[in-house]
Image (tube, rainbow, N blue to C red):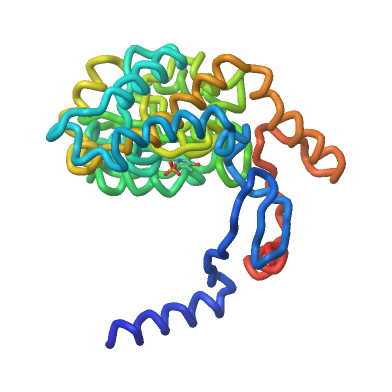
Amino acid sequence: MRLDEFAQTKLRGLENRGLARTPATTTRHGVQVTRQGRPLISFCCNDYLGLAHDPRVLAAAKEAAEQGAGAGAARLVTGGHPGIEEFENRIATFLGREASVSFGSGFLTNLGVIPSLVGPGDRICIDALAHASLWAGAKLSGAEVLAYGHNDLQALRDHLKQPLRGQSLILTEGVFSMDGDLAPLPALIQLASEFEAWLLVDDAHGLGVLNQGKGAADLDIPLLVGTCSKALGSYGGFVTTSKNVAKLLHARARSFVYTTALPPMVVAASLAALAVVAAEPERTLRPLARALQFTRLLGLPLAQSAIVPWIVGSPERALAAQR
Ligand SMILES: *Cc1c(COP(=O)(O)O)cnc(C)c1O
């Protein structure tokens, strides 16, 4: 089949199932956006604290632009620029961890971390609704992948009870990125400890929003993944963990070793945003307060996070609502 023919066939299939999607050109000025000349208010953005356009964040990025538009190469080749090491130290300190490793994005973090820690002979137990990047990292690892029903602790326990010679790793989101509900983290920590499993929590939507901006950080989670692309308004991903695990990831995670480090200006923006979050914890209370107000006014189930699902039914109805 010709490549273009293949694409057309696939696209027709997507259209028939109401799943065809194309990105619309949109200029953002914070919550106000412009699309095809129309001014609109955006309810769908992860820039929860408005930091993507904060003057302090932009000033830091502009100043760091003097250091070059790009990092030049991967950090094991050229060395890391000072900002990236400062970011790793600051985010680890802010979240009360020994160390952290910075990646190109949250997606790349999960692609790198999971296969560095488990492989064939090991087992991954993953929440069925976990983010695509957790699934991708799990599949890439070569470990056996067992899904458990969303937040279903009994199903997880049943998986963990199966005998295994290798290591078990549990993967979950802290705040689920589609449904906005929370994982039962204390119970998951308890189960992990009972079965000597490791636990990775992707808290992309908790950081900067819940618990005065610290998300799940107060809990005993050995692998806490986050992203700078949401509440921090910038770009890049990270995992906070122990010194030794960070050292191992710096040496072995393939999406760290074989890819160029984040540009200095992007990291400077993340650092400035993190400073705002640390200095103004009251700012972090706003997204959940607004989400609660929104759900009350619309008679929806009360928001648990800044994400409010509004289930309209079929994919077609969802896309119509988006239009
Ligand atoms: C958005 C998101 C990611 C991806 O983060 P990026 O930095 O945008 O690549 C990973 N995990 C979860 C749970 C997310 O919501």
Task: Find residue 3 and report its image quarter.
Answer: bottom left
| Quarter placement of the C terminus | bottom right
Residue 288 lies, in percent from the top left, at 70, 30
Q: Position of residue 44 (x, y in %)?
A: 64, 49
Looking at this view, is 137 or 240 the one in front? Answer: 240
User: How many discs mark residues in the rendered view?
Assistant: 0
Image quarter where the N terminus lies is bottom left
Residue 292 vs residue 283: left or right? Answer: right
In this rendering, the answer to whether 157 lies above or below 2 is: above
Foreground of the two, 100 or 85: 85
Q: Is residue 242 above or below residue 178?
A: above
The residue positioned 54% from the left and 41% from the top of the image is: 150
Residue depicted at 48% across the width and 25% down the height: 272
Residue drawn 33% across the image and 42% down it: 108
Decide if residue 229 is on the left or right side of residue 286. left
Residue at the limit of the structure toward the left, as seen here: 77
**Is residue 254 visible in the rendered structure shown here?**
yes
Left or right side of 88 for 293: right
Q: Quadrant of residue 24?
A: bottom right
Nearer the observer, 259 or 194 = 259
In the rendering, at what x and y percent does residue 221 appear? Answer: 42, 19
Q: Going 22% across and 16% down the picture, which residue do you hit?
A: 244
Q: Is residue 154 at least partly visible in the picture?
A: no
Return the residue nearer the eye: 41 or 129: 41
